[in-house]
Image (cartoon, rainbow, N blue to C red):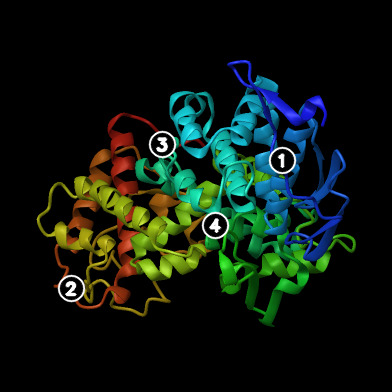
Amino acid sequence: MTEHDFVTASNGVQSPLPALPALPPLVKYFDRFGRREQVLRNPATEKWIIPVNGQKLTIDIDFGHPWIESFIKGHLVDILTRGSVITLQNYYRAFCELNSSGSLRTIIFAVATEPPSAFQNMWIDTFRNSLSRHQAVAIRSALRFACEWGVGQWRSSDVSLVRSLPGHELSKYAGVRNGSSMVATAQQSMLTEFLDQTARNACRLRGLGELQAAGVLALAFQFGLRRTQIASLEKEDFVFHSDDTLHVRVELLKQRGQKVGRTVNRRIQTSWVPIFKEWSARRRGPAQKFFDMTPDQVGAAISSWMEEITGKRHSGGDLRHTSAQRLVDAGVSRESLTDFLGHTDVTAANVYFSSSSTQAGLVNAAMGYSPAYQGVAAAARGDLITAAELLSRPIDQQIAGIPHGFPITGIGACKAGQSSCQRNPVLACYTCHKFLPVSEERVHRSLLEDMREVVRRFDQPERLARVSPAMMQLRLTLEAIEEVAEMAREGGGHDD
């Protein structure tokens, strides 16, 4: 035995390091982004090259001690065989950070030599507070590896102890709860206008940049797709059933067990189909991926494009959260939202439903504490309501038909011209960036009161599905009119 087979404890006593499971000569795993099987040969070597999301990841396992390096190699191989390349990448980075700070050696040697109960005390007293959340997650994963492979004094029965180790508090979905991850109504309108215009002019656009941007943003905005899902799409995933009917096949991420690799079909909004049709016909070269972008490139591009279009930098995650919240506000069930998000349970869906009640409160304030509004706000919480008086025409011919019977002249001007607008007047104007409102507060206050009167006509709940589109438009319009009225009162104006 050599000096590397022993470790000296703080009391000066030398303890032998336990044996480790032998590494296999090669490791086969499935590359979900590349859609093919990959092979890592001779994982006992110090340096690995692993394809990750269209790029090459270099894993340089140099942590200053052979036993530590062998232990971490075994752990990362175990992760890789489970098909989670991104998890491997995250854990490797955490181990590198710990090695740079000098903590890795102490923690891993404690795993090697201490009994589980003693390590638990060390975790509570010292280790946990010295680790970031993602570092703690990586170490706990390494502990589970030690349990499964019987490293040192760890056994499979100790997995429950590892699971009970106190971790770091995580305010998951905090941005959903406080609204910071949501794209504002006005910015959603700007994005929609960009997508509509790009679709209308698709065949006349000289460059491909707008088509690429519109295609990526449409998928992120309509379906809440993650950047990896968008980047992974290939031409064969888009199926045209007619000139205006297009379905896209998407692989769901973060699935468990037999659901790993599950795909779903989504129908792209009819008015945006020309974007994808033109991009598919004109995109350059034999690129395997439809948009010829890596996930990192998609993520960076979405933020940049959103800033260019709306004036504010929003991530793909913000678009995903906004899409989910929009569906909840429109009246979908928890199960439908869970399916839309591709989740395996309703935990996240419950957060969006809880947040929807908060957003409905904003409209309640705009209503001036109208008692009748309490029934309207309930629609966002999943109760049942009808609005037969509001929907006098088919829903495909108008957004909600709220203006019936009310004077709507004098509210402002449209930079594009109302005759060329394909949207329902008034309901769309207040959420359109081309709208130039007059500076008289009384004009907007008068219209706001007229719309409040419409709300007071709501009947008792019957069928949510018949009113949910109107409810969504009503909420957004009330907020927008209130905002314009306040702007007029303060003497502000819109920039051209």
For label 1, the residue is 71
Tell me the kind of residue under disc 2: Pro
Residue 374 in view in this figure: yes
Residue 268, placed above or below residue 120: below
| Crowd tier of the residue under label 1, counting other residues whose Cα lies within 10 Å: few below 14, some 14–19, many 20 or above | many
Sequence-earlier tag: 2 or 4: 4
| Crowd tier of the residue under label 4, counting other residues whose Cα lies within 10 Å: few below 14, some 14–19, many 20 or above | many
Residue 355, placed above or below residue 140: below
Q: CA distance from mark 3 to mark 4?
A: 30 Å
Instruction: Please report the residue visible at 56 percent of the width from the left and 64 percent of the height from the top.
Output: 256
Residue 399 in view in this figure: no
Sequence-earlier tag: 2 or 3: 3
Residue lying at the far bottom of the rendered structure: 241
For label 3, the residue is 169
Secondary structure under tag 1 reads helix
Instruction: Please report the residue visible at 34 percent of the width from the left and 37 percent of the height from the top.
Output: 439
Foreground mark, 1 or 4, reads 1
Q: CA distance from mark 2 to mark 1?
A: 62 Å
The circle drawn on residue 221 is 4
For label 2, the residue is 461
Residue lying at the far left of the rendered structure: 371
* Residue 212, position as x, y percentages in the image: 72, 55
